[in-house]
Amino acid sequence: MKKMLFLLAVTTILVVTSIPSSEGHNITKILAQHPEFSTFNHYLTLTRLSSVINRRLTITVLAVDNAGMSSLLDKHYTLPTLKNILLLHVLVDYYGAKKLHQLTGGSSTASSMFQATGAAPGTSGYVNISDHRAGKVSFSAIDDAEGDSPSTPSSMFVKSVKEIPYNISVIQISGPLTSPIAEAPAAAPAPVNLTESMKKKDCALFAGLLLSIPDVEKTFDSGVDGGLTVFCPIDSAVKSFMPKFKNLTAEAKQSLLLYHGYPVYNSLQMLKSNNGLVTTLATEGAGKNYRFTIQTDGEDLTLKTKIVTATIKGTVVDQDPCAVYTIDKVLEPSELFKEKEVEPPAPEPAPAADAPKGQKEASSPALADGPDSAPADEKTADDNAAISRTVLSFGRLLAAAASAALVVAVV
């Protein structure tokens, strides 16, 4: 049995070590090592595209140097429009330098993030890649909705900046891609009013609690632009929780409300993909943890504290950089509420005390009394030894018979 377990362990180690590890990437850090892309890097962060890129498992970034970005910024596009243009420069497939020079048929059509967002009509937002003679590769955005022809001029491949095979490829192109559709004026998304949105989706009571404490409401509102996910307990959950809430101190009430804010934007898919322990708005500036665990349970997404487990029931708002989801329970941090005590196991019965001198001890049915049991034990041991000798002798006889039969067969 031990030998089998050892072989199984060795096999498992060999299998695990033979699986290639998935290396994560951070586009901001990659480009920070190349000062010639500082402007491009800055606007990826400003438009929040850097976080989108970092979340993708397979992606290609067409980086433009500072001179190329200057020509783009001279046109004074609004930030939403500039974001659409930069989305053209993020391809949702992997194109390393080797692949670019080995395109089947000499060309390929790649989908950009601009196309993937659904903002581009028809086949607009796709990028045509062509491998030319002398090792030259061109990139051009496909413009019309019918996809008849790519727009001009093309931008040329300059060099590979960073490649993590089949994860991320960052390559430099000679200038920004041009596309009238991407460059069309884009309206800025309407600002999110958290409490008003909550009131419309069965979260009026929780919205009222936020409004009742100005400092808390201000913290939530100020977090919207920087990225925020709010978990809003539905009205029935808040109503049943109110007796506990009223008994909290003013400071504890603030902490409990802030505990329902996660200072990072997350879509439902992102939450499903990034299970684990998370910080909250209550964690910031506090000496206590105030964290909970996000976990996928089948089709459900749950939020687990050491006190309760809540389930996400619906979406109130999902508009990057802000998302609000309804949950069926108020989240209770262990910093404010006691964990349910687990009953300790029953103690084992204490050994019987020595009987007073002169009094005969009660014997256990399973155990024989003192010296009187020795002969019986010895007899049992002798019987077992005799049986063992008999079995051994019989085994030797069988072995000898088998050997004799083998000799006869050979002769």
Image (cartoon, rainbow, N blue to C red):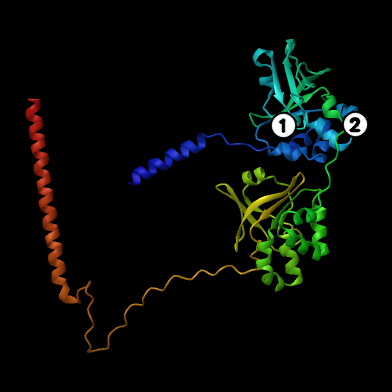
Point 65% across, 67% down: residue: 240
Instruction: Specify the quadrant of the image occupied by residue 101.
Output: top right
Task: Determine crowd level at label 1: few under 14, some 14-19, many 20+ residues with C-alpha closer than 10 A.
Answer: some
Which residue is denoted by mark 1 in the rendering?
116
Amino acid type assigned to the residue bearing label 2 in the image: Leu
Instruction: Give the percent coordinates (x, y) of residue 294.
Output: 62, 52
Which residue is denoted by mark 2 in the rendering?
73
In the figure, is residue 404 to the left or right of 324? left
* 59, 172: nearer the viewer: 59
Dot 1 or dot 2: first in sequence order is 2
Q: Quadrant of the C terminus?
A: top left
Instruction: Give the percent coordinates (x, y) of residue 156.
Output: 79, 19
Provide the secondary structure element on which disc 1 rests: helix
Q: Work out whether 185 lies above or below 246.
A: above
* 145, 393: nearer the viewer: 145
Instruction: Specify the quadrant of the image occupied by residue 171.
Output: top right
Q: CA distance from mark 1 to mark 2?
A: 24 Å
Task: Determine crowd level at label 2: few under 14, some 14-19, many 20+ residues with C-alpha closer than 10 A.
Answer: few
Amino acid type assigned to the residue bearing label 1 in the image: Ala
